[in-house]
């Protein structure tokens, strides 16, 4: 895991995806296998397989499986957040711009699925990566999206504090 500092001195650790990263893309057992769609089962299986591949250091194959897991979760109408975090983590070392774009994708999915905490985390991580690759206009755009979220009662105090330290407040 790599810690990155952005304006205001806040540390953002890439290599973790927040609370959602610890969860499976889907939890078919919770609703009963008889109700799980084929796509939701494929998404969960691919995500677990990709995690095993990452543990073995086979990041290229893991990335392909994660992208397929995202596709399968979307086909099943599910939130692909954990798989998108994992793809961004895999891409971070070799393609930070692509990882930032993947985090933007995650922020959009989080917004569509009503997860403001993951949306804020993804926007902050994307801003960090855009700063690293020298895209100040992209950093500003992410900061502008984060500002109104500071008033959200749905953000944990620690995340709100991290955001306040890392972005200028008007």
Image (tube, helix red, strand yellow):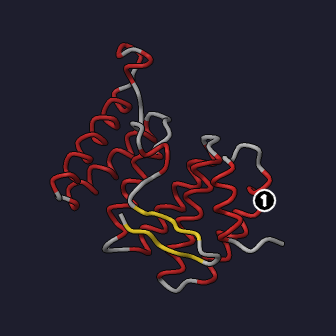
**Residue 121 left/right relative to 116:** left
Which residue lies at the image location 60% right of the left edge and 53% below the top edge? 119
Q: Image height check: is 166 above or below 84?
A: below
Q: Image height check: is 68 above or below 32?
A: below
Please give the residue where the numbered disc 1 appears in the rendered image.
148
Outermost residue toward the right?
A: 170
Which residue lies at the image location 47% right of the left edge and 83% below the top edge? 133
Residue 7 sits in quarter: bottom right
Which residue lies at the image location 42% right of the left edge and 67% below the top edge? 99
Whole-percent x and y of residue 162?
64, 62
Residue 48 sits in quarter: top left
Question: Which quadrant does the N terminus fall into?
Answer: bottom left
Question: Which quadrant does the C terminus fall into?
Answer: bottom right
Which residue lies at the image location 28% right of the left edge and 41% below the top edge? 46
Whole-percent x and y of residue 87?
36, 57
Q: Nearer the viewer, residue 162 or 74?
A: 162
Whole-percent x and y of residue 88?
40, 61
Secondary structure state at the residue bearing disc 1: helix
Q: Nearer the viewer, residue 110 or 71?
A: 110
Crowding around mark 1 (Cα neighbors within 10 Å: few <14, some 14 to 19, many 20+) is few
Residue 59 sits in quarter: bottom left
Whole-percent x and y of residue 98?
42, 70
Q: Image height check: is 112 above or below 145?
A: above
């Amino acid at each position: 895991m790599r810690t990155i500092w952005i304006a205001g001195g806040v540390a953002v650790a890439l290599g973790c995806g927040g609370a959602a990263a610890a969860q499976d893309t889907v939890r078919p057992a919770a609703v009963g296998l008889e109700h799980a769609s084929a796509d939701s089962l494929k998404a969960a299986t691919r995500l677990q397989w990709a995690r095993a591949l990452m543990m073995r250091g086979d990041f290229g194959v893991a990335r392909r499986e994660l992208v397929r897991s995202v596709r399968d979760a979307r086909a099943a109408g599910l939130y692909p957040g954990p798989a998108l975090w994992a793809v961004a983590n895999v891409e971070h070392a070799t393609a930070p711009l692509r990882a930032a774009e993947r985090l933007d994708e995650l922020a959009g999915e989080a917004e569509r699925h009503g997860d403001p905490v993951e949306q804020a985390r993804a926007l902050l991580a994307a801003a960090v990566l855009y700063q690293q690759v020298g895209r100040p206009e992209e950093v500003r755009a992410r900061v502008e999206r984060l500002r109104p979220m500071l008033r959200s009662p749905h953000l944990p105090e620690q995340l709100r504090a991290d955001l306040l330290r890392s972005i200028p407040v008007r």
